[in-house]
Amino acid sequence: MVNELKPGKDSYMSISEVLAHRVSIDHFDPKGVVSDAQIAELVRSAQEAPSSFNIQHTRFVAVTDPAIKGRLREAAFNQAKITEAAVVFVLLGDLRAHEDYAVRIRAAAAAGHVPAGVAEYLAGTALSFYANPTASREEGLRSAGLSAMALMLAADGAGLGSCPMIGFDPEAFRKILGVPERYFPAMIVVAGPTAPNNMGRKPRLDVNEVLRINGAEFPG
Ligand SMILES: Cc1cc2nc3c(=O)[nH]c(=O)nc-3n(C[C@H](O)[C@H](O)[C@H](O)COP(=O)(O)O)c2cc1C
């Protein structure tokens, strides 16, 4: 664990320290292993990410099989970390997640957990909000981004390195993994034990460059 209390250290990392601690890893230990139980634990943490209406659009395909990772690497511009990282998480956006949500919230109402009127309002709003395929795709991307960040922080907390990735061919990934049409590969997160000689923290723009308060007076 990265964030454990060590002798002589009397407090855990603050949230800002945790955020600054995560970096994208280039070099993973090719012999590193992440168990199925640990993968499930990481995904459980990633599911803490928020989602619109709590629809939970993200699905996770975890790939540890070297042969499948080899094929994914070919479809990811031959990026070595795809085969060197112990696990490749492919985050899928569910284009029809709002439909399942409507079924779920109505079932919750039928079981007496939510007032029927509230459930009907939420189901109806979600269904009309995401009837437009572009809106549902954008929501899938937003959700995958938030899930990916939660997943990477969870990996960091477990002492593993990680890297978010968009350098891949989504349609090739779809074929390799047999992803049904209703889902789309939104992004990848690779994770695993790291190798030496990784870069440290990369600089960020100054807050003065990225923040305006009560208006967006950025240079046009
Ligand atoms: C959406 C997204 C896509 C990325 N795609 C790749 C990628 O395909 N390959 C890669 O090596 N790094 C990729 N990165 C990692 C970025 O290069 C990295 O996050 C950035 O340089 C900032 O460094 P840091 O993550 O260490 O803070 C991606 C990051 C994001 C957020």
Image (cartoon, rainbow, N blue to C red):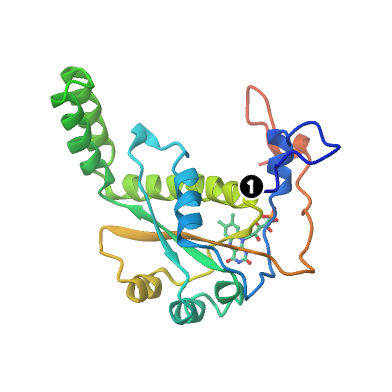
Q: Is residue 8 above or below residue 120?
A: below
Q: Quadrant of the C terminus?
A: top right
Q: Hey, which quadrant is residue 56 in on the image?
A: top left
| x, y percent for residue 193 | 65, 64
Q: Position of residue 76 (x, y in %)?
A: 51, 75
* Residue found 61% across the figure and 60% down from its top: 163
Looking at the image, residue 60 lies above or below residue 219: below
**Up-down: is 111 above or below 203?**
above
Q: Nearer the viewer, residue 169 or 85?
A: 85
Q: Mark 1 packing: few (<14 Cα in 10 Å), some, or many (20+)?
A: some
Kind of residue sitting beneath label 1: Gly
Question: Which residue is at a point 76% across and 45% down the rendered structure image?
Answer: 205
Ligand 1 located in image quadrant: bottom right
Q: Nearer the viewer, residue 106 or 130?
A: 106
Q: Is residue 179 left or right of residue 154?
A: left
Residue found farthest to the front: 7
Q: Toward which corner of the image does residue 111 lie, by quadrant?
A: top left
Q: Secondary structure at mark 1?
A: helix
Q: Position of residue 184 (x, y in %)?
A: 35, 60
Query: With 83 as the anchor, is 71 left or right in this view?
Result: left
Seen in the picture, residue 10 relative to 144 is either above or below; the reply is above
Which residue appears at 68% of the width and 62% of the height?
25
Residue position marked by numbered label 1 in the rendering: 157
In x, y percent, where is residue 138? 39, 48
* Left or right relative to 194: residue 92: left
- Any atom of ligand 1 within 8 Å of the CB at mark 1? no
The residue lying furthest to the left in this view is 110
